[in-house]
Amino acid sequence: MNCVESRFLALEPDDAFAAEVLAFKERVRRLVGEQLYLDHPPHLTLAMSVFRVEADVAGPIRELCRGLAAPAVTIRGWHVFEADQLTGSHTLVCDVAPDAKEPLARVQQEAIAAAAPRRDRVATRECYDESWDRLSDEERANVEQFGFPFVGPIWHPHVTVASVRPEDWDAVWLDLAGTPPEAIVRFSHLSIYGIRGDEPILIERFALEGVG
């Protein structure tokens, strides 16, 4: 029996923006069929690591959320991670405006610190063996110290629509390029997900209760 498992921490957007992201996902599905991440719930990943199965991650995250205010940030336009380092496909995401990153970064740092004592650093590093050669030295250091995605200046917060196979990309971009997302989005919940295959499995979801 596997004694470790991957989990990730994610901020979840308000209902209005979640519905918009789901509509984008459905457009992609109608155009080119199933793609990686297409059936994942709308979320903004803060960190992904591997933990011992028995590790209590929920406890410290629950306590953290009692003092955290829900960040409200501007989502503006598309970003494309071309030939994504982890998937090899083109990953289409709703982009966070550059000047809106700071409140998300504060939440990310606190969430990583809360979960850090319980993560398995060796197993987390091993998850990225296949993509290790495609990562920069700074990215590798981030994975080893914090998990994935990255922290600090190289972190690019976003809400993913799908990672689209190269042969399907032109049809998707032709349809969606002209209707980019534009919204002020409140991220009111912080969730813990497990991963089964490529599918996220919700473990616990906490409201951010602090006063902004």
Image (cartoon, rainbow, N blue to C red):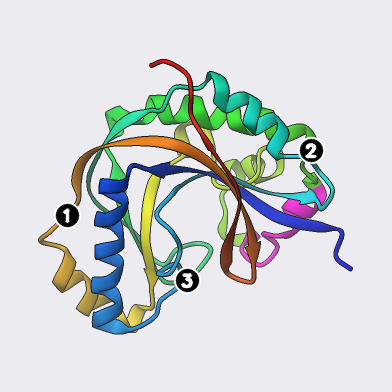
Q: Which residues are magenta?
A: 122-132
Q: Which residue is mark 1?
A: 180
Q: Earlier in the sequence, mark 2 or mark 1?
A: 2
Residue at 30 percent across and 77 percent down: it is 29
- Residue 112 at what x, y percent from top left? 63, 33
- Residue 12 at what x, y percent from top left? 43, 44
Disc 2 marks a residue whose amino acid type is Arg
- Residue 94 at what x, y percent from top left? 29, 51
Q: Earlier in the sequence, mark 3 or mark 1?
A: 3
206 with respect to 187 (left or right): right
Q: Secondary structure at mark 2?
A: helix
Q: Nearer the viewer, mark 3 or mark 1?
A: 1
Q: Is 130 covered by the magenta stretch? A: yes
Q: Residue 103 sits in which quadrant?
A: top left
- Circles 2 and 1 in contact, beta carbons < 8 Å: no
Q: Earlier in the sequence, mark 2 or mark 3?
A: 3
Q: Which of the two residues, 192 or 178, is positioned nearer the viewer here?
A: 192
Figure quadrant of the C terminus:
top left
Q: Which residue is mark 3?
A: 88
User: Gap between marks 2 and 1, in whole Å?
Assistant: 39 Å
Q: Which mark is residue 118?
A: 2
Disc 1 marks a residue whose amino acid type is Pro
Residue at 38 percent across and 47 percent down: it is 158
Q: Secondary structure at mark 3?
A: loop
User: Gap between marks 2 and 3, in whole Å?
Assistant: 30 Å
Disc 3 marks a residue whose amino acid type is Gly
- Circles 3 and 1 in contact, beta carbons < 8 Å: no
